[in-house]
Amino acid sequence: MATLSNSFQQQSQSTAIIIPDKDRSLTVSYDQLTAEVASFQQKLAKLGVTPEAAVSIALPNSYPFIVAFLAAAWQRAIAAPLNPAYKQSEFEFYIDDLSS
């Protein structure tokens, strides 16, 4: 069965992600991305995140967001991005609503 995790070129130095920045752009290979996503996925599993569990992610669009989103997907959980600019009451509502 094809999954997101096995669709990556896991043993490749080819560029997987480029995050442009006016000061210093970030270029990440498939090898690096796979290692970081797998590491975060293992941390989610140790925290008890199970398949179909909702994982709220409140990060700006960034490399850490990409890693967190993919790790949740690799754990077969539901990645639930939240706007990091939400107010406390909004976070509480969505986290409660998602049971994340």
Image (spheres, rainbow, N blue to C red):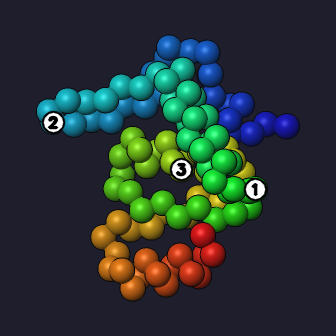
- Badge 1: residue crowd in 10 Å (few <14, some 14–19, many ≥20): some
The secondary structure type at the circle numbered 1 is loop
Where is residue 71 drawn, in percent x and y?
59, 44
Q: Is residue 28 left or right of residue 37?
A: left
Q: Which residue bears the numbered disc 2? A: 22
Front disc: 1 or 2: 1
Nearer-N-terminus badge (2/3): 2
Circle 2 Cα neighbour tier, 10 Å, few/some/many (<14 / 14–19 / ≥20): few
Q: Which residue is mark 3?
A: 69
Q: Are marks 1 and 3 in contact (CB under 8 Å)?
A: no
Q: Position of residue 78 (x, y in %)?
A: 65, 60
Q: Residue at x 43, y 31 (%)?
A: 17
Task: Please state, as top left, top right, bottom left or bottom right, where the N terminus lies in the image.
Answer: top right
Q: Earlier in the sequence, mark 1 or mark 3?
A: 1
The disc, 1 or 2, on the residue closer to the chain's N-terminal end is: 2
Q: Amino acid at mark 3?
A: Phe
Residue bearing mark 1: 51
Give the CA separation, mark 1 to mark 3.
14 Å
Q: From this viewpoint, is residue 73 visible?
A: no
Residue 39: image quadrant is top right
Vertical comparison of 29 with 82: above or below: above
Q: Residue drawn 68% across and 48% down?
A: 45
- Vertical relation: 25 (above or below) 65: above
